[in-house]
Image: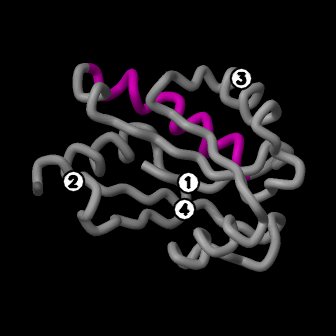
Amino acid sequence: MLNFIFTTCGAICPVMSKIFSEVPEKLGADASKLRMISISIDPETDTPAQLKIYAKNYGAGARWKFLTGKVADIVTVQRAFDSYRGDKMSHTPVTLLRAAPGQPWRRIDGFVTPDELMQEYRQLLASR
């Protein structure tokens, strides 16, 4: 599972992060196969130290990584997923899932509940 966030966001990102935080518990034993990645779209503010604090606030475990990088690289990644909206204040909620490396990505635009995200994940695994 992959999403785009930034730590100073006061609208979309806290909701998406809260949803991500609830998915492993809902998956139960299937959570051992799960990897979650949140990529900061504000790398100038979101240093590794800042992301570590943010991750702790959401109870992120070892399977949930928070990534940052150079602005140009983050924009490239967002564009690759058709998620770049010009600046961080224009971003929209999107979650991307795939069953395994090399498999196609499934895109979910908008907010989903943790239960809906869990269902999507299980459907992906079943379709492999």
Q: Which residue is mark 4?
A: 94
Q: Which residue is mark 3?
A: 57
* Spatial CA span between label 4 and label 3: 21 Å
Please tell me which residue is depicted at 52% across the width and 76% down the height of the picture. Answer: 80
Q: Tag 2: residue type? A: Leu
Residue 34 horizontal side relative to residue 60, left or right: left
Q: Tag 3: residue type? A: Asn
Front residue (pair 41, 85): 41
Please tell me which residue is depicted at 82% across the width and 34% down the height of the picture. Answer: 50
Please tell me which residue is depicted at 70% across the width and 50% down the height of the picture. Answer: 68
Q: Tag 4: residue type? A: Val
Under tag 1, what secondary structure?
strand
First along the sequence among labels 2 and 4: 4
Q: Which residues are magenta?
A: 12-28
At label 1, counting other C-alpha atoms closer than 10 Å, the crowd grade (few under 14, some 14-19, many 20 or more) is many
Under tag 4, what secondary structure?
strand
* Spatial CA span between label 2 and label 3: 29 Å
Task: Look at the image and say whether residue 16 sits in the magenta stretch.
Answer: yes
Under tag 2, what secondary structure?
helix
